[in-house]
Amino acid sequence: MPTVLIIDDEQNILVTLARALQLEGYRTEVAGSGKLGLEKAESLDVDLVMLDVMLPDIDGIEVLQKLRSGERDLPVVMMSGHATVEIAVRAVQLGAADFLEKPLSSDKVLVTVANALKLRRLTAENRDLRTLAGLSSRMLGSSAAMREVWEQIDLVAPSNGRVLITGENGTGKELVARAIHDRSDRRQGPFIKLNCAAVPAELIESELFGHEKGSFTGAHQMRRGKFELADGGTLFLDEVGDMPLAMQAKLLRVLQEGELERVGSCETLRVDARVISATNQDLEAAISSDRFRRDLYYRLNVVPIHLPPLRERKEDLPELAEFFLHLACQQNKRREKSFAPGAIEALAEHDYPGNVRELKNSVERLAIMVPDEVVGPADVRRVLHWGQAAPDRDSSADRFYDRSRSLREMVTEAERACIQLALRDCDGHVTNAARQLQLERSHLYKKMKSLGLK
Ligand SMILES: Nc1ncnc2c1ncn2[C@@H]1O[C@H](COP(=O)(O)OP(=O)(O)OP(=O)(O)O)[C@@H](O)[C@H]1O
Ligand SMILES: [Mg+2]
């Protein structure tokens, strides 16, 4: 339970507040002066401070200032018997979580304390998530090939030039598109992605250009298209090689004229979106077989960036593997793990047809499935068993077997690992994972929650 430090010179308040909080299960510390309060806040493991404005030695506002100036984001609830609006405003400006007027009602105190603690927890979680999101969109690689890609990104980013990114599946095309956007003058604008392969042919036009209400069956409301949404920013056309021919003609017009109409509308809209596209197809071949328009190709391919497959830049593998191991431990809230000598070499024995994504998934699998903190070459071969038949199912229990743990802990560990793998198999789609695991969806949700999985 959290610890609340109460700083007040009225003995009576210290006693009643402490009792009310203790009854709710909080631990409490008390201080009868500003000086003692600051000392206790410094030396004890305190989660929240309740602070009186009027103290005999130091002014409460000054104590607040000192409490808030440290590294620790300590929530402080102010209390006062004769609060003026000015003092309350000043307290909030200085970062007080809340302001309570005396006489205190214990109900009000408990709600305020619970809210302030909850806000602090959410803020911390949010910060962690941001750090994680920042981490997982980092692009690494110092091979000659990747250095060249970086040079191209830096050159092209500040311009408005259209970029066509090519490369096999999982080579990092989307990361490159985001890197260009983030380094461009449009970085404050939106980055909008349309996966041309995932949208049914008949809906692509409305996805790109939007539609007016009632323009076709099912168009219940006006909807803006991705082009409009990307105004002032970047439109990323992923898997552009899969765009139906009819659509290619319409896209060409927008690229030529910078103008479009929503489906069912005759109003012409001007949009300023920078287009970056990506494909894993050989567009030259698609042009030869009349599946892709040559004129569109020239429009999209002003600056080409090609990402070589991982097997042609294995120098990048150690750096990527170390990073993905760190990332997976963070994401799965595991203790940090490391590779033993030889483990990276074992990872490098594989050819990675799925490129960086396959490496990332493989390392995540290791992070989840290897119970030790050090991942050795044998673990790599056992867990990833490339090119071998699937391992004997019975023997896989030794991954979880640990003499120092109870059966319950080991089963929980196995359960968590299986659910994570199923979720990964289904690209995070909970309904599909539940089906695969033969569970009710709600049951799986409950389990994920109790196991601390997102
Ligand atoms: N150079 C890199 N550094 C760090 N992570 C990378 C790198 N390249 C790719 N990744 C990671 O690998 C995964 C696949 O990357 P991305 O989605 O950008 O590939 P893609 O080329 O768009 O793949 P696809 O063709 O399948 O859409 C992502 O999780 C990405 O973060
Ligand atoms: Mg992609």
Image (tube, grey):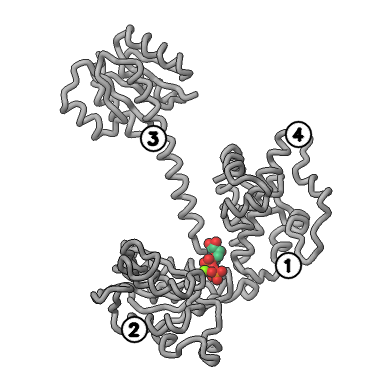
Q: Earlier in the sequence, mark 4 or mark 1?
A: 1
Q: Earlier in the sequence, mark 3 or mark 2?
A: 3
Q: Is disc 3 placed on a helix, strand or loop?
A: helix
Foreground: 78 or 213? Answer: 213
**Whole-percent x and y of residue 268?**
24, 76
Any part of residue 233 in sight: no
Q: How far apart, in angstroms, are the residues tagged by discs 1 and 3?
A: 48 Å
Residue drawn 24% across the image and 25% down it? 61
Above-or-below relation of 180 to 113: below
Q: Are marks 1 and 2 in contact (CB under 8 Å)?
A: no
Residue drawn 77% across the image and 38% down it? 402
Q: Earlier in the sequence, mark 2 or mark 4?
A: 2
Q: Label 1 sits on what residue type?
A: Glu
Residue drawn 47% across the image and 77% down it? 240
Q: Which residue is mark 4?
A: 407
Q: Label 2 sits on what residue type?
A: Arg
Residue drawn 37% across the image and 68% down it? 226
Q: Which residue is mark 1?
A: 349
Label ID, residue 253: 2
**Whole-percent x and y of residue 111?**
36, 24
